[in-house]
Amino acid sequence: MAQSAPTSTTGHGGRFRARRKHPVSDIRVLALSGGVGGARLLRGLQRVVPPGTLAALVNTGDDFEHLGLRISPDIDTALYTLGGLAHPAQGWGRHDETWNFMEVLAAIGGETWFRLGDRDLALHVERTRRLKAGETLTAVTQAFAQRFGIDAKIFPMSDDPVATRVITEEGELAFQDYFVRRQCAPVVRGLRFMGAEKAELSDAARAAFASPELEAIIIAPSNPWLSVDPLLAIPELRDALSSATVPIIAVTPIIAGKAVKGPTAKIMSELGIEVSPVAVAAHYGDLLDGFVLDSRDAVFVDRFRMPVEVADTLMTAPEGSARVAQTALRLASALKIQSVFPQPEGGM
Ligand code: FO1
């Protein structure tokens, strides 16, 4: 149903008609994502679904204030990756970056452990300004996504503050202190997500879950403990997943006993958890309807108590992302048909 394009005002009193935006009610695929691995799957999903039908709920537990700036790393990784601006090998930040700001900051004795490129800086400065002017993180993120020509809807998991705290053998650390300053070295004993129990979904995220066109929910191959659990710690989000009437599919973040990127395997072993895709599926428990397993781990198939698709899940190249996205969506649609036409007892 064609809706009149909403008009909105610029920050300078002018009026302009926002480009016609797809309404959230067009959303067919909803992805939960954090970090680099998650963003790569979002890139694949954006390539294989029709325009305007993909929404992503992105982790904000890594967000922090640094040098007086409000920084949302997983949101920015999603923006850069979907906007074609991401640094391919690094995953975070831009490919076309310069570092003059950091150079001078170092020269004047500023904090340089968290590296902010000159172009990246504009996002943090403008986000900080708009948040201080009273805009929500959801509104700011959508404005940036539009400016980057991104078709998918990128939603923070909440507009309320949630802070991931990493409980280590050396005591509790703020997320970026653990992840960047200490390069994930401290031994992890547990995690907590400050504010999650009080955090709510944004109206836009709620509308995405309620979309009449919704066909699948995909848990991206992000670090389950660091990047997905903050989302699952939000009661309203967890309830929305538990009451979802569409299949929920997780894509493995572990391949042949290792994480593609980041400390997933290290944290699993430090938490005394078997470093395998089976343990990841068990971590998500009865939320899942299906799992995408990497072909290098096909040996684990018979340890799964849910439908599994096996594929090459490495997404270093863009076509890899599209392949994994297709695999996850194919599994979801197969399960959806099954739920509508259940197999006779003793069926497949
Ligand atoms: N990760 C690093 O390992 N070192 C950095 O200096 C760094 C800077 C940075 C700046 C902006 C941004 O959006 C992300 C940045 N990241 C950096 C990545 C970030 O810490 C992680 O991507 C997430 O927090 C965890 O996925």
Image: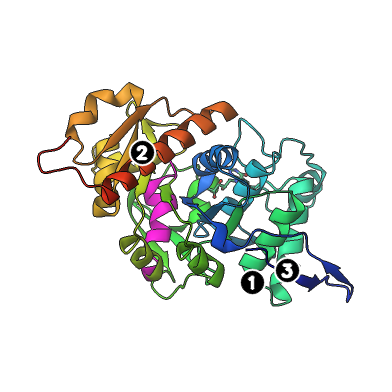
Give the number of the disc on residue 331: 2
Q: Is mark 3 within 8 Å of ligand 1?
A: no
State which quarter of the image contains the C terminus: top left
As measured in the structure, the alpha-carbon distance from the residue carrying label 1 to the one carrying label 2 is 35 Å
Which residue carries the number 3 mark? 4
| Lower position in the chain sequence, tag 2 or tag 3 | 3
Task: Tell me residue 226's x, y (percent).
Answer: 42, 51
Is 308 placed left or right of 94 in the picture? left
Residue at image mark 1: 136
For label 2, count other residues whose C-alpha is less than 10 Å away and answer few (under 14), some (14-19) or many (20+).
many
Q: Name the amino acid type tagged 1.
A: Thr
Name the residue located 47 percent from the left edge and 34 percent from the top edge: 326
Indicate the secondary structure of the residue bearing disc 3: loop
Which residue sits at x=41%, y=48%?
219
Quadrant of the drawing holding the N terminus: bottom right
| Residue at disc 2, CB closer than 8 Å to ligand 1 | no
Task: Name the amino acid, label 3.
Answer: Ser
Give the percent coordinates (x, y) of residue 215: 43, 51
- The image quadrant that residue 293 belongs to is top left
28 falls in the magenta region: no
**Label 3 neighbour load within 10 Å: few <14, some 14-19, many 20+:** few
What colouring does the structure picture have? rainbow
